[in-house]
């Protein structure tokens, strides 16, 4: 029975008591209207007795038992202090040390303090103070340069990544909705395949400029990367002729050894290519990682390919189907990520909503 229906009947009982009706008359009248939803005999007679004694309130009395002190400011502050001392504390531990019920602690954590228990986010490494400061400095310099010269419209970024013949589906992607009487789905334990091929991708805010594959059995070295950059310059000449003729573009890549090698630096200097600094251990600030490769792998993850050639054809198709508007959004997201990095003091920020308001 809904609470509102109970209160409604109590109001009627109160009126009938004041009208001089007997207990049985009141019960018969309620039964005629509410049927099976009528208050039980004992409950009805209890409320009739209260109203005859002069009670006016139709609401329930406060329940007896543990005093309602759990949500007092002092208790909330004590629980918050306990959690700040050690964020791994369990609700049972906090309840025992503060002296309130586990349910009260849970409600205070969720409702009063807005806290939820989450797993740590995996990051490339624990950053040093110097590395955090570098991340902040680089982001500030990029954003300042973009405000003055709109450099992001002229940045060409790229990287390499392994594409597997079979890549594992993320655990969350395998989650399904079940009824209580249904068995859980079963899945065999699997691992990434040993068959893989390395993809090289370069793009700007308008779309793909170079999609290339590293030959089987070879690795990316300074000399091979120069050949890739030569092909990239040729693509820029054909697809972005204005940028190429005016030397009005910037190259962005990460700090992989091949990218930083002496022969590559000499090649870039000789061809007047301006390179934008990328902070170390920062895939969250590399569009290739947080957008292009992530989108590609989400699409093909869990698919078992028959051959390396099929991997290449599928990957190329998926990337080329990305509309120009999405590449543009990627660059807008890149700038937002820089703002969040600054707000986080250079720390990794993915999954942290507390830095969104700083954008």
Image (cartoon, grey):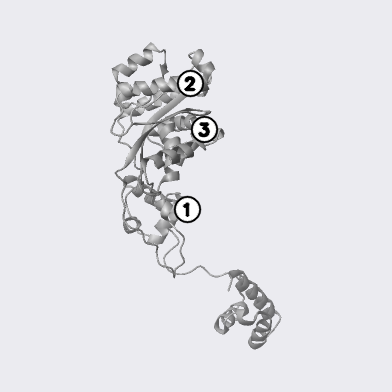
Residue 31 lies left or right of residue 172; in this view the side is right
Q: Residues within 10 Å of mark 1 (few under 14, many from 20)?
A: few
* Comes first in the chain, label 1 or label 2: 1
* Comes first in the chain, label 2 or label 3: 2
Residue indicated by mark 3 = 327
Q: Is residue 198 above or below residue 140?
A: below
User: Residue 240: x percent and y percent?
Assistant: 52, 21
Q: Is residue 145 above or below residue 20?
A: above
At horizontal 41% and vertical 35% (from top left) the residue drawn is: 289
Q: Residues within 10 Å of mark 3 (few under 14, many from 20)?
A: many
Residue indicated by mark 2 = 236
Q: Quadrant of residue 38?
A: bottom right
Question: Which callout, 1 or 2, points to the residue nearer the camera?
Answer: 2
Residue 331 lies left or right of residue 127; in this view the side is right
* Comes first in the chain, label 3 or label 1: 1
SS at badge 2: helix
At horizontal 59% and vertical 81% (from top left) the residue drawn is: 44
Is there any visible trace of residue 270 in the rendered image?
yes
* Residue 111: mark: 1
User: Residue 327: x percent and y percent?
Assistant: 52, 32
């Amino acid at each position: 029975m809904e609470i509102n229906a109970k209160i409604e009947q109590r109001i009627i009982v109160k009126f009938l008591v004041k009208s001089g009706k007997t207990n049985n008359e009141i019960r018969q009248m309620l039964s005629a209207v509410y049927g099976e939803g009528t208050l039980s005999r004992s409950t009805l007679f209890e409320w009739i007795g209260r109203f005859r004694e002069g009670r006016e309130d139709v609401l329930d009395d406060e329940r007896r038992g543990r005093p309602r002190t759990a949500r007092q400011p002092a208790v909330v502050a004590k629980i918050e202090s306990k959690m700040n001392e050690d964020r791994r504390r369990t609700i049972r531990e906090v309840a025992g040390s503060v002296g309130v019920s586990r349910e009260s602690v849970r409600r205070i954590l969720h409702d009063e303090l807005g806290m939820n228990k989450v797993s740590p986010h995996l990051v490339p490494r624990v950053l040093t103070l110097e590395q955090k400061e570098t991340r902040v400095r680089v982001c500030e310099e990029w954003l300042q340069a973009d405000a003055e010269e709109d450099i992001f419209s002229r940045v060409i970024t790229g990287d390499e990544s392994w594409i597997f013949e079979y890549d594992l589906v993320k655990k969350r992607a395998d989650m399904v909705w079940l009824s209580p009487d249904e068995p859980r789905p079963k899945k065999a334990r699997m691992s990434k395949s040993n068959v893989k091929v390395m993809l090289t991708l370069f793009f700007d805010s308008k779309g793909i400029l170079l999609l290339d594959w590293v030959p089987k059995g070879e690795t990316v070295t300074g000399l091979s990367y120069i050949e890739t950059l030569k092909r990239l310059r040729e693509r820029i000449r054909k697809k972005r002729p204005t940028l190429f003729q005016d030397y009005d573009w910037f190259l962005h890549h990460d700090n992989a050894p091949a990218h930083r090698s002496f022969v590559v630096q000499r090649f870039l200097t000789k061809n007047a290519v301006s390179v934008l600094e990328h902070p170390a251990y920062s895939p969250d600030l590399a569009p290739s990682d947080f957008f292009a490769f992530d989108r590609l792998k989400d699409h093909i993850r869990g698919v078992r390919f028959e051959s390396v050639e099929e991997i290449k054809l599928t990957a190329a198709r998926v990337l080329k189907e990305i509309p120009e508007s999405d590449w543009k959004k990627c660059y807008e997201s890149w700038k937002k990520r820089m703002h969040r990095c600054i707000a986080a003091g250079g720390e990794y920020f993915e999954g942290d909503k507390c830095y969104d308001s700083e954008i």
